[in-house]
Image (spheres, rainbow, N blue to C red):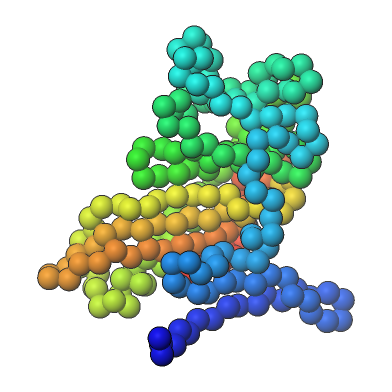
Amino acid sequence: GGETTHWTDTVLLTRNGGGWLVGDVLFGGGWDFANKGTLLDSLAPLPRPVSPEGRFEFVRFDPAEVDAGKPPFGIVEKSFGKLIWSAPDELGDPSRPEETILWSSDSKRFALTSRLGTRHLGCFFFGWQESGFAAMPWEDSGQLEELADQQLMAKAKAEGFTENLRFGTTITDDTIPKRWVDSDSIVVVRTIERSIAEGDMESAVGGSARCLIRWDARTGRFSMIRNLHSNE
């Protein structure tokens, strides 16, 4: 229609011996149907219920089964049909099953995405310990939220808003696992979108931040080791 669209994709280079190789591409298109995230994210395995080596399967139970005592969802060892891990009490709504699970390539860990409230998807990590899966805490997840908030405020200022703006409805507030780099490291993205107002101006702005977190066996926790990209 005679219109021109401008955007910037960013190439990340990785040192390899005496030269450089393309490590990833950060997609920068801002329109609704543009590619989001990075090239490696788009090539990563999608969440699927069965673990890569086929031993475990993520299963959901219907409301009748939950009423009979089963959890909303859990992990079954396929060869025995035995439930070896159940959803924590604070997670899972059998009337609105929205959980997804992202396995590490060695099937020893998984990232669970579950809805918390009406507008928030949370991310939780679990790892194999002896005979079952146990929670793996992430100690500094608030840092990722702060980075996303910074991006949100930067976009608000670009639209002419000041520090005196008022926040309204939270439209989106999600923490999503994107891909396991290895069994100890995973890329996570936080996306926030809120309605804002100031004077007679109203809008909806969002911010997105991504980071690499890594499991530290010494502390027994995940922690952020790198801010990968904070403006999707």
In front of the other: 64 or 26:
64
Can residue 214 be seen here? The reply is no
Q: Which residue lies furthest to the top in this view?
A: 68
Q: In which quarter of the image is residue 197?
A: bottom left
Lateral position of residue 45 relative to residue 146, left or right? right
Q: In the picture provided, is 137 more to the left or to the right than 231?
A: right
Q: Where is residue 208 in the image (x, y as percent from the top left)?
A: 46, 62
- Residue 57 versus residue 218 in the image, above or below: above
Name the residue: 24% across, 62% down: 196
Q: Pick the residue in front: 164 or 118.
A: 118
Q: Which residue shows up at 50% across the image and 21% down it?
A: 62
Residue at the location (69% across, 55% down)?
44
The picture places residue 148, in percent across and down from the top left corner, at 43, 61
Q: Is residue 109 left or right of residue 65?
A: right
Q: Quadrant of the N terminus?
A: bottom left
The correct choice, above or below, for 118 with respect to 35 in the image is above
**In the depicted structure, whether residue 82 falls above or below residue 208:** above
Q: Residue furthest bottom?
A: 2
Q: Position of residue 187 (x, y in %)?
A: 62, 55
Q: Where 92 falls versus 171 (above or below)?
A: above
Is residue 42 in view from this perspective?
yes
Q: Give left or right: position of 95 versus 203.
A: right
Q: In the orientation shown, which residue stands out farthest toward the front?
A: 1
Residue 179, percent across and down?
65, 52
Q: Looking at this rendering, what residue extends furthest in the right direction?
A: 17
**Labels in figure, total:** 0
- Place residue 120 in its image quadrant: top left
Q: Residue at x 65, y 66 (%)?
A: 39
